[in-house]
Image: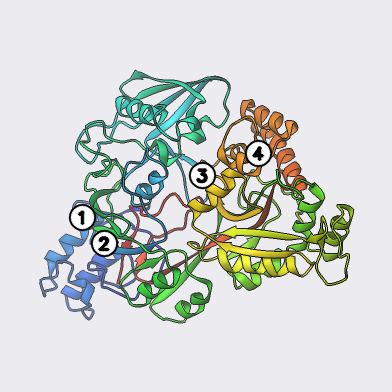
Amino acid sequence: MKIKIRFGIFISILLLVLIPSVSAHLYGDANEDTYINMQDVTRLERIVLEYDPTTTPADANQDDNVNMQDVTLIESIILEQVPFPGGHLNAAMIFGPSSTLDPANGWNGWYVRKAGIYETLFKYDDKMKLTPELATGYTQENDTEWLIHLREDVVFHDGSPFNADAVVYSFARVMNESNSRSSEYDHIASITIEDEHTVRITTAEPYAPTIASLTNPLVSIVSPDADNLDTHPVGTGPFMYDSYEQEVSLSVVRNEKYWGGGVRLEGATLSYISAGETRALTLESKDNDIARGLPFPQVSTIESNPGLNVMSKETMRLYFIFVNTGKAPLDDIRVRQAINYAIDRDVIVDAALEGVGGVPAAGVFPSIFPWTNVELTGYTHSKDTALSLLADAGITDIDSDGMLEYNGEDFHLTLMTYTTRAAMQPSAEVIETQLEDIGIDVTVELLGSSAIKEAMTNGDYDMAFYSYGVAPTGDPDYFLTHHFDSTAGYKENGWIRYSNPAVDSLLADSRAAMDQDVRKEYYDQVQDIIVEECPEMFIFHENELVGYNTGVMGYAIYPNEITFLTRDMYIGR
């Protein structure tokens, strides 16, 4: 934010946004440079004095006259004395809430956070930097006690105050044993009120990811006075709930009393459209201003449209294969490694993702994440190495028919996946072709995610191609513990039936270590072991592809996929 004085009277607060625009007029932008600032006041005064020709956006109050009333209005907009003329945004999203809008229920917190309704004590910005949100900071008193200092200038959408009572109330809802995700906060022994704007978190044992765990939308801070959080969410975010049609759309309006400053957009509607082609078409037809998760074939079409553009950014989302290590011959590390060598990740990115949708994965974490073990090289495609490892495991082409045999029969694997993400099916089909190229008979089975999870729970599967965000709390512990710690009891570890005491010990040590460099050493070792033993196979990290009307301003892709609507977004010219 830059401040300067003009004529000794008015203060200019520059509204910095970088995306160019060509659509609806931004009234008040007299010089049509996509900003509203004191340069527009200067231009408007010149227009009034007939030194410069008039422009349509110069009529800030839209009364069909350009005069000093428009000058006054623009100055009031700059000073945030009147609402910003930001328009209404329509966005096509991939996934949305279930039957409830309660952030403490399942994964619904992600969706109401994306809508700008709720906030957490801390958050990650668009560069994955941990920053305070409803907190102002914290003090670590010892290895198990943390004081969280709260903002004093915040009210909920219903007018009730944000304070320590609200924080304790919100966490109690998640930590209650009846909550299906309560075990994720077993590390917290208690959360108590120190004063109106301070809470004390005491952990059951030293737990280094404590502050990171406070960024999870599951622990969004809700109003204790709300009547029914299932149907009418009440948070502190830049947008307030307006309406919801289940599995169709969620509408919000601007929070005029937002603690973080003036909100640009007047409102927004998030439509939930599972078919990628349909999302793209709604952008091209101008029914939506933004479409997330573009199908790869549509990217060039949208980029060729002068009123549209595509934004791309590497994210924390990993596409990977769950492997049933409890089922022969996948219980043999040589077989798993052979499959890894047979998969050509570069070809998958080039063919299935058309060269734009992802980055080949060497391990769990992408290059943009500071906890990534940068020494990992992963599995370079090698058909010869794959066949050699399979031969060592007793899987060979006995009858020279081009197909490998295991226990006297063709070696067959089923790869299950789902289709709600654009990359899933084409990537699975490329993997199928690559494994068949070394003689493995593969069937790709397309199912709903609930059916796949049931099969994995029952152990009735070979492999399942899936997609997860690998750091929803910004800390490496979340994914690594859920998937590879056999003592933690999480479903993902149960699905792969993987156990390694060395990994369990390293993860326990890393959670207890408060020194970040020490933690990094432990996590590097864990990443090295799981890549070698491959109870999961890491294929690529997603580049999110977002199509947008070039009138959309202030939008940024957040790599952790938690934040979408922000106070800085608006519709320009």
Residue drawn at x 33%, y 69% as measured from the top left: 288
Residue that numbered label 3 is attached to: 472
Q: Amino acid at mark 4?
A: Phe
Q: Is residue 469 found left or right of 396 in the rendered image?
A: left
Residue that numbered label 4 is attached to: 484
Residue 126 against residue 274 in the figure, above or below: above
* Quadrant of the rendered image containing residue 135: top left
For the residues labelled 2 and 1, say whether their Cβ atoms are less than 8 Å apart: yes
Name the foreground residue: 339 vs 241: 339
Q: Amino acid at mark 2?
A: Gly
Residue drawn at x 51%, y 36% as measured from the top left: 212
Residue that numbered label 1 is attached to: 83
Q: Amino acid at mark 1?
A: Pro
Residue 134, visible in the rendered structure: yes
Query: Label 4 to label 1, Cα distance in Å?
Result: 50 Å
Q: Position of residue 374 (x, y in %)?
A: 72, 49
Q: Secondary structure at mark 4?
A: helix
Query: Circle 2: is it few (<14), some (14-19), or many (20+) Cα within 10 Å?
Result: many
Residue 317, visible in the rendered structure: no
Query: Circle 1: is it few (<14), some (14-19), or many (20+) Cα within 10 Å?
Result: some
Q: Secondary structure at mark 2?
A: loop
For the residues labelled 4 and 1, say whether their Cβ atoms are less than 8 Å apart: no
